Amino acid sequence: MICPKCQKGETQVIDSRDDEEGRVIRRRRECLSCSNRFTTFEKIEPVEIIIIKRDGSRENFSREKVLSGIKKACRKRPITEIEMEKMVDKIEAEILSRGKKEIKSEAIGKKVLKLLQRKDEVAYLRFLSVYSTFENLSDFKKALRILNRSQ
């Protein structure tokens, strides 16, 4: 680490602390040349995940977009904000653990559906209706029959 005062490259770490989530480390350093003390922050650089949409276009993964879809499905349902955040955490962790940089949007949709089905049937059906692009009442009836069989 280069000292911001004298530009020498030899420093010593005096103290290290993690933030609450353990995602950032704060380090107090001292320059061995001029004794200047300064603070540095170390964090994990997120992996850029590319989403391949149904039409073949690509866009960066957006945690906020996934959370927004879950929130819409869970509107006025007994699911807390924290539970929804944890669903997105789980989905993001699964995507990152694959080790690949690209994933189809359908795969993310299936992950959301899987979590919602375990949590709340109404939220599951709401998300499914958008995800599967239901066009009429018979599409809903078919989804309900499948849901009933899986229980």
Image: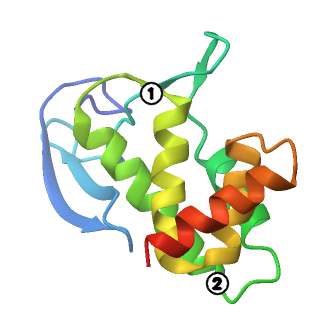
Taking 7 as reference, is 66 left or right? Answer: right
Residue occupying the point 64% across, 84% down: 80
Taking 87 as reference, is 35 left or right? Answer: left
Amino acid on which the number 2 mark rests in the picture: Ile
**Label 2 residue SS:** loop
Disc 2 from disc 1: Cα separation: 27 Å
Q: Is residue 49 above or below residue 13?
A: above
Image coordinates of residue 110 in percent, x first then y, are: 49, 47
Residue occupying the point 44% across, 27% down: 49
Q: Nearer the viewer, residue 14 or 48?
A: 48
Residue occupying the point 52% across, 79% down: 119
Quarter of the image with the N terminus is top left
Q: Is residue 99 above or below residue 92?
A: above
> How would you rate the neighbour count of disc 1 (Cα within 10 Å): few for under 14, some for 14-19, many for 20 or more?
some
> How would you rate the neighbour count of disc 2 (Cα within 10 Å): few for under 14, some for 14-19, many for 20 or more?
some
Image coordinates of residue 44 in percent, x first then y, are: 32, 42
Q: Nearer the viewer, residue 99 or 7?
A: 99
* Quadrant position of residue 75: bottom right
Earlier sequence position, callout 2 versus callout 1 = 1
Q: Nearer the viewer, residue 85 or 19?
A: 85
Amino acid on which the number 1 mark rests in the picture: Ile
Q: Which residue is most to the top?
A: 56
**Label 1 residue SS:** loop
Quarter of the image with the C terminus is bottom left
Residue mark closest to the camera, 2 vs 1: 2
Q: Which residue is most to the right?
A: 136
Residue picked out by circle 1:
49
Residue picked out by circle 2:
79
Residue 120 can be seen, yes or no: yes
Residue occupying the point 58% across, 71% down: 84
Residue 39 can be seen, yes or no: no
Q: Is residue 130 above or below residue 119?
A: above
